[in-house]
Image: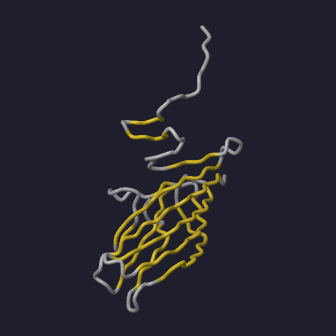
Amino acid sequence: MAGNLNTLDSVGGFSVSNKVIVNHTYDAKNLNTLEVRNNFYDDSFAQHYILRGTNTSTLSVDNVNGIIPIPSNTMNFVEAVVIAVNDDNTASITQKLESALQVNGTGVVTELSTMTTIIKDSIPEGQTWEIDVFTGGGANKFSYSTTRIGTTKTVKWCVYVKVVSIDWT
């Protein structure tokens, strides 16, 4: 018997396990990862992430060292906005990183280029805070590795990342 399909409708919004996903004013909330696709080009997509870490570490999307997955046979354009602050708010750095990454058929991630724009740098003389693309996390994975040298103060890192991935086969 034929039936009519209706669009999803919820007067108060949409939730999963009592967490609001879309509220009544059409705002998306509480998303762990957001993926954007173009219906016309099904071989590409964009995903957004928030990475965190402290001191010298590999930044992670969660508390179990989860790093960003990217598919095999792709070219990837990665934009990242970085902020790092020490524990008493006396030093910080803000940067934008723009990278091109290639992933081959076996999942090996290669950094083709990275441009760094320093927005603000108030790191004290004698200290070094650095962030670099990290491609050593296994097949089809990447993140950022951070370095803190010359201080015992805790440095917290937070990075907002957008990955645009395009099939390259």
Taking the image as shown, residue 40 lies to the left or right of residue 80, namely right
Residue nearest the observer in this picture, 148 or 22: 22
Q: How is the image coloured?
A: secondary structure
Decide: is 150 above or below 96.
below
x, y percentage for residue 165? Answer: 60, 55
Farthest-out residue, left: 152
Residue nearest the observer in this picture, 76 or 124: 124
x, y percentage for residue 121? Answer: 48, 82
Residue at image position (60%, 70%) is: 112
Residue at image position (60%, 7%) is: 1
Which of the 4 quarters of the picture holds residue 158? bottom left
Instruction: Tell me, yes or no, if residue 139 can be seen here.
Output: no
Q: How many marks?
A: 0
Residue at image position (71%, 42%) is: 40
Farthest-out residue, top: 1
Decide: is 12 above or below 75.
above
Residue nearest the observer in this picture, 37 or 132: 37
Residue at image position (44%, 84%) is: 122
x, y percentage for residue 102? Answer: 59, 62
x, y percentage for residue 108? Answer: 52, 60
Residue nearest the observer in this picture, 82 or 120: 120
Farthest-out residue, bottom: 125
Instruction: Tell me, yes or no, if residue 47 can be seen here.
Output: yes
Taking the image as shown, residue 108 lies to the left or right of residue 20, namely right
